[in-house]
Image (spheres, coloured by chain):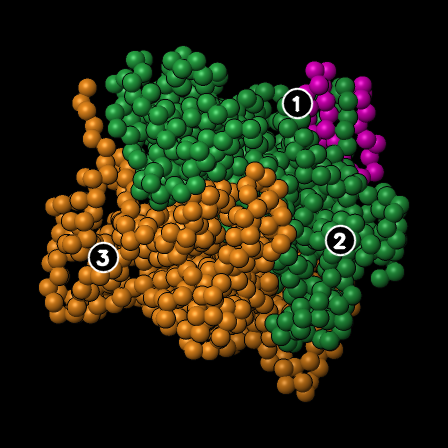
Chain colours: A orange, B green
């Protein structure tokens, strides 16, 4: 298309063609994200539009959601970068065309010629920056372009935003309940809904405030910090200390070598057994476990973290761990800590902490009491909240199933609605007011108050004068006549930015790095008024329309709604 | 590895090398499924094993789940093919090795040399055939091989089986409640957990008994039938009939051409308005909608199916649909039907059906009353069950969010447990009996009764004489001493078959086509005793161990369990 050059030229001045813009942006992370990843009806509609000569009609669609997830009053928007990567590379391959022809055998050849040429060089995408805190009804993305082409984007855009925003929000909620000082580890790959359910979860949980993931593929793809130690199977795969063949361990400075680290561990275990302050807590510990811990310490003396609940935490796991940790200590290493994966995590973390303090005192081991205690085992928002309500000594949480599958609510209901075609505003009515769409190509603003908190989001028609800081502005509920309020914002922020300018001459926003998106997300969460964020009875954040848009919505509504007859 | 040739040679005699076996089987459907798609701790454990000289110890792991999902008493096993495709192609790339080296900088070079050589030529995989009905505790897969290599498979295998089995089971449950005569359409792509959440859902819902999907990418990848018509946006994108430029429509035989199909539709709408038996039901219908339906019929005269609830089903959608359908009829076409996406589906389907019958009678339109009525709008097992308890006239269901995200239970808790190492059986104990693993490399059998129903599954040690048809066999609950029963099976089926023979000389089971897996699934569901399958209070299917295995489990348990002291 002729427009292709124009698009690319405007993109920050650098790339000169659509192909170059695509190269700058890169392809979708997941190679299965192609223009065929859409619903069949997008193609049947495209054909009907084409057949009617209507496929190039200029349409505006809003992508938004209707209700915050997890019973909360906020959502984090994510998935934008993947949408932009899709449209930057949007082009059907010859094999795709052949397949579509086989599926729709009665369609005329000219339609497939048209599909062969379709790209997104004439599509404009405006969006709220990824990682922003967002609210129901406000468009996360506004997509404008030829109606047939934009419809093809509906399914993949909704797919890419839906889960991304849901799991980012879930991660943010877990961070909120855990508190800033705790380490949060995403361990969900094995329970995720498919391979990229896992990979996407790792990416978006990191944006939402997690510190690291266990997922190596996600670590490589996105540069997310990786964490992990060993499993129960590792412990039970050892039968005895005799299995360890190479028993030598160098000191951290490389100057000394302990020729038999296994014996050193055994010596420390005896010292622990004989120590007055610890006696009576344990007797003989499990030798499989001791062998596994010793072997793991030999492999990772700088980073020894042991899973201590395979047999019995206090009678075996903790004493075995301490023996190995003290042996490492005596060579100049410092052990990292333990992981608890079953039982009463509050109680076990407390008694483990007491044991570590006793060891510190008994043997003068510096900071031994500060050993990191990680908890895992089907954790979620509720269980962390319950732990917080008791005393506990957990420093880090490993969270899997409930986080990545969004078990509490497995889908966010994003929708993609036509709001204007050929400059004519369109409204979708419904008996359920929550399902009525807000018509018109719109601009969206966030109004901030004196204390720096966002006060209200406001949508206006495209050509209205935008709200200004210091001016008194009437904000109206889009559907409820009696809900309205005057606001004098301290600051006004326009929410929708241009991420894909199409054939317009607008500059294109850059796609920020994952780390920058994460920083934005954490800052946004931080700046919200606390009552919107609390778990129990959070206050809904207000979303409004301008007075002019309100009047227009209701004018259209009356025009479009069928008049009923009482019978 | 030297073993590679041996593996491949046994695979049905044809391929001579591991590379050829991989080529025969093909790579994973999702290119993101690589050996890096695993948890970091699989690599740290591999290093610790390697450092201890223990990485080639021969280990046996079982992959199983502990509880049937969705409150039911059955599960369908799926995901096997993707696991086998992964191991057939299991090989680290140089870039993977470099990345791992950067993540584990303290590991010795020799370990990375070892990783460079690792493949699955010495791993044996036995599994229950994909699409089988399966039960808790019975291994779905038994994986045997060098402990470090097999551990690397844990995370991707669990990931690939977990969601696949969960969503197949969910689909099977939807089929069960809908009944055999209804058409089931999977419409979940936009709400799925990521792109391959959607693609996998389409595949596995088809296996579980769905008839078609809306997902074009899945249709192309797997040959699943595709279905779809148009959306509300299509309807509201039209303003009036004037927009339709090309109004000509040929008859199906191509002999006649109606030059103005739009006028023909308008004529039929007037006839409907004047028909005695229909008068009073509607007045003026919505012209956007009429234009959209007419346009869609011009594009797909052989397959006209319209979404009738954009404005008002009975006052606009149904009359407009009938006008277009009758116009098609008069040219020799036959319309397909309608879709309802909101409101009281039971009521609307009934009044729509009555209207269709009235049209058939009024205009002598053959089979017009049999028009297909499809329902969508957040359907799930419960809503279909509720529809069934009322009268309704729905012929086909389009199901999305609840089906593909498995909203009612978003994860199946598959686990991967060490059961034997170096011929030594291993048991994983837990205070929760449900979490105790069943030790030993095992064989598994399904025992069938006289009526052809499966009676009980039984696990035995590898070297025990297998149960035989006609013999009296004692089946014991694995953990509960008092639960046991004698069975005389009519037929005995060995469940675990060899899908990847490793360096053994066993023949390899072929991976069946998707259609064959679907047939197996439907046959298996069919042959279950109905009381295991019902939604309300289903009877648990019995899973047992042989008397010998029972004794051995409890011998090990006593040996391994720490002896407590009452205080």
Q: Which mark is residue A461?
A: 3
Q: Decide if residue B249 is on the left or right side of residue A136.
A: right
**Measured along the vertical axis of the image, is residue B158 above or below residue B384?**
below
Q: CA distance from mark 2 to mark 3?
A: 57 Å
Residue A307: % across, % down: 58, 59
Q: Marks 1 and 3: which is nearer the front?
A: 3
Residue A510: x, y in percent? Answer: 42, 72
Q: Is residue B81 visible?
A: yes
- Is A525 in front, or is B566? A525
Q: Is residue B158 magenta?
A: no
Place residue A266 in its image quadrant: bottom right
Chain identifier of the residue bearing label 1 in the image: B
Disc 2 designates what residue?
B88
Q: Tag 1: Cα neighbours inside 10 Å, few (<14), some, or many (≥20)?
A: few
2 or 1: tag closer to the N-terminus: 2
Circle 1/circle 3 CB separation < 8 Å: no
Q: Which class describes the residues within 10 Å of circle 2: few (<14), some (14-19), or many (20+)?
A: many
Q: Residue at point 47% right, 70% down?
A: A5
Mark 1–mark 3 distance (CA, rounded to whole Å): 61 Å
CB under 8 Å between discs 2 and 1: no
Task: In the rendered view, tell whether residue A456 sits above or below residue B78.
Answer: below
Q: Horizontal placement of B366 versus B82: left or right?
A: left
Q: Is residue B51 above or below residue A403?
A: below
Residue behind mark 1: B527
- Start and end of the magenta stretch? B444-472
Residue at 53 percent across and 69 percent down: it is A19
Say which element carries label 1: helix
Residue at 35% x, 70% y: name it. A506
Q: Is residue A434 above or below residue B174?
A: below
Q: Point out residue B551 in the picture as x, y percentages from the top left corner.
A: 73, 35
């Amino acid at each position: 298309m002729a427009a292709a050059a124009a698009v690319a030229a405007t993109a920050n001045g650098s790339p000169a063609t659509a192909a170059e813009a695509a190269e700058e942006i890169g392809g979708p992370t997941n190679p299965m994200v192609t223009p065929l990843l859409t619903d069949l009806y997008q193609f049947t509609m495209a054909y009907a539009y084409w057949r009617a000569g209507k496929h190039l009609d200029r349409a505006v669609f809003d992508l938004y959601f209707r209700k915050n997830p997890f019973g909360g009053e906020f959502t984090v928007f994510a998935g934008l970068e993947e949408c932009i990567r899709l449209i930057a590379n949007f082009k059907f391959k010859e094999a795709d065309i052949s397949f579509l022809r086989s599926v729709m055998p009665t369609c005329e050849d000219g339609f497939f010629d048209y599909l062969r040429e379709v790209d997104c060089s004439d599509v404009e995408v405006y969006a709220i920056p990824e990682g922003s805190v967002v609210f129901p009804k406000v468009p996360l993305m506004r997509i404008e372009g030829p109606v047939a082409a934009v419809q093809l984007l509906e399914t993949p855009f909704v797919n890419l935003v839906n889960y991304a925003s849901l799991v980012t929000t879930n991660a943010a909620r877990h961070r909120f309940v855990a508190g800033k000082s705790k380490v949060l580890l995403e361990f969900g790959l094995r329970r995720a809904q498919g391979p990229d359910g896992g990979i996407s979860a790792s990416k978006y949980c990191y944006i939402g405030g997690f510190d690291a993931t266990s997922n190596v593929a996600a670590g490589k793809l996105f540069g997310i910090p990786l964490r992990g130690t060993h499993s129960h199977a590792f412990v039970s795969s050892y039968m005895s200390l005799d299995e360890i063949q190479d028993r030598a361990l160098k000191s951290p400075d490389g100057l000394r070598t302990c020729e038999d680290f296994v014996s050193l561990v055994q010596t420390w275990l005896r010292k622990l057994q004989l120590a007055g302050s610890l006696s009576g807590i344990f007797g003989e510990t499990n030798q499989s476990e001791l062998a596994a811990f010793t072997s793991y310490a030999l492999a990772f003396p700088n980073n020894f973290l042991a899973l201590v609940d395979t047999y019995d935490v206090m009678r075996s796991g903790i004493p075995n761990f301490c023996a190995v940790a003290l042996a490492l200590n005596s060579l100049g290493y410092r052990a990292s800590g333990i992981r608890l994966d079953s039982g009463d995590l509050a109680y076990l973390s407390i008694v483990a902490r007491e044991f570590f303090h006793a060891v510190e005192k008994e043997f003068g081991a510096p900071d031994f009491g500060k050993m990191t205690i990680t908890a895992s085992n089907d954790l979620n928002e509720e269980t962390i909240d319950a732990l917080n309500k008791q005393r506990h000594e957990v420093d880090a949480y490993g969270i899997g199933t409930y986080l990545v599958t969004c078990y509490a609510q497995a889908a966010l209901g994003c929708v993609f609605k036509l709001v204007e075609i050929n400059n004519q505003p369109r409204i979708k009515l419904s008996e359920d007011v929550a399902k009525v769409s807000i018509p018109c190509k719109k601009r969206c603003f966030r109004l901030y108050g004196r204390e720096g908190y966002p006060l209200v989001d406001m949508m206006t028609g495209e050509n209205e004068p935008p709200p200004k800081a210091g001016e008194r502005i009437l904000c109206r509920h889009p559907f409820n006549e009696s809900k309205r309020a005057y606001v004098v914002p301290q600051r006004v922020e326009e929410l929708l930015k241009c991420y894909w300018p199409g054939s317009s001459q607008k500059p294109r926003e850059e796609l920020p790095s994952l780390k920058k998106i994460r920083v934005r997300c954490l800052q946004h969460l931080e700046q919200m008024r606390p009552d919107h964020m609390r778990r129990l009875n959070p206050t809904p954040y207000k979303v409004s329309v301008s007075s002019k848009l309100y009047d227009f919505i209701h004018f259209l509504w009356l025009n479009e709604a069928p008049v009923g007859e009482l019978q």
